[in-house]
Image: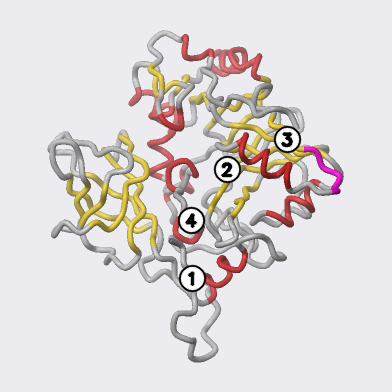
Amino acid sequence: MSAPADVRAPSPLLARHGAVPAAGPDAGVAWHYGDPVAEQRALERGGAVVDQSHLGVVRVAGPDRLTWLHSITSQDLTALAPRTSTELLVLDPHGHVEHAAGVVDDGEATWLLTETAPALAAWLDRMRFTLRVEVVDVTADWAVLGEPVDAEGAADEPLTWRDPWPRTAPGGTRYGADDDAHPGADRPWRLVLVPRASLDEAVARREAAGWTLAGTWAAEALRVAAWRPRASHEVDHRTIPHELDWLRTAVHLHKGCYRGQETVARVHNLGRPPRRLVQLHLDGSGHLVPETGAAVRTADGREVGQVTTVARHHELGPVALAVIKRSLPTDVEVLVDADGGPVAAAQEVVVAGEGVSVDRPPARGPVARGLGLPPTR
């Protein structure tokens, strides 16, 4: 396997006039190019491109690639057709999320788009054993562009990953709104692979067609509005996919055994996730905006969760995603810590408060006390 690539290498598009660099997990690309509200509106109406070249790309080749990936991840990949997009999770033995990746195969290799390319490639390489697979982190050679397009890549287009969110995939289930009522249904999104040396040219072609170059401010605001989890933000060391409603698109409940599968099945069939993803509508009257990682509290000061993403949406105003205790009633307003004082926030339910999926098998009788989620701390 080649040496891990530097996914933090600054994008050449940061040299554009007005570009403001992003920070944190998005370091290396632009937060915005001078007018984030206009960029967000252009993206929402389908006329913008977003530099996502800070994301990593792992290529898995070899005749055993799909059956092998199927056996060690959360997704059913045995019959994945070329240019058909899905996503997978790598879980630890207790079912906690370690890696997430978009998946698309070109008929010769499987491409994984991820925020943890060096670590994911290294883990996959250790798991090869004697199988006919080759794992290479190709981030140094390939870059990613985000587009508001709801279509798989055609045969005459560059290889493309179409975000499956929030359409419940075969073998998946949901803990929240049905697919048609889900706000994510209004967010078309795909990632297009382009040679890194041609990134400027690929953007210029889209600009020549009338598209706007937008930054991560715009893309993140629409992601938050769509309740779309992101591994670098919504995942911590004890996250299980049920808490983020990620069984919709990234987990197949009826495939064979894989690492972490026991927890996935047990929580789905018998238990309840200890936490739940929620969207917070923040009170903007005080002009205070909390930071990612801020504590979420009840009126009496009890900490019940943590903000995972903060965004300014051009219509919704200041909004956030947060992971909170599932036991907190869904109609309770909360306070979010901020520099200058707490910010009031109203919950919008993403994962149902009762913690039960829509197709949970009916109970067959009394269940032994304590049967459910294994210890996560």
Label drawn at residue 272: none
Residue with the mark numbered 3: 59
Q: Where 147 sits versus 80, above or below?
A: above
Q: Residues within 10 Å of mark 4 (few under 14, many from 20)?
A: few
Q: Position of residue 227 (x, y in %)?
A: 42, 48
Q: CA distance from mark 2 to mark 1?
A: 29 Å
Between the residue at mark 3 and the residue at mark 2, the CA separation in whole angstroms equals: 18 Å
Q: Judging from the image, what secondary structure is the residue with disc 4 in? A: loop
Disc 4 target residue: 180
**Which region is colored magenta?**
130-134
Q: Secondary structure at mark 1?
A: loop
Between label 1 and label 3, give the one nearer the viewer. Answer: 1
Mark 2, mark 4: which one is toward the viewer?
2
Residue at image coords 42%, 26%: 42
Residue found 60% across the figure and 58% down from its top:
251
Residue depicted at 38% across the width and 71% down the height = 354
At label 1, which amino acid type do we have? Leu
Quarter-of-image position of residue 168 = bottom right
Give the quadrant of residue 94: bottom right
The amino acid on which the numbered mark 2 sits, given as a three-letter code, is: Asp
Disc marking residue 373: 1
Q: Label 2 belongs to which residue?
A: 163
In terms of sequence position, does the residue under pointer 4 or pointer 3 come before the other? Answer: 3
| Of callouts 1 and 3, the N-terminal one | 3
Residue 198: percent from left, percent from top: 65, 15
Q: CA distance from mark 2 to mark 4?
A: 16 Å
Q: Nearer the viewer, mark 2 or mark 1?
A: 1
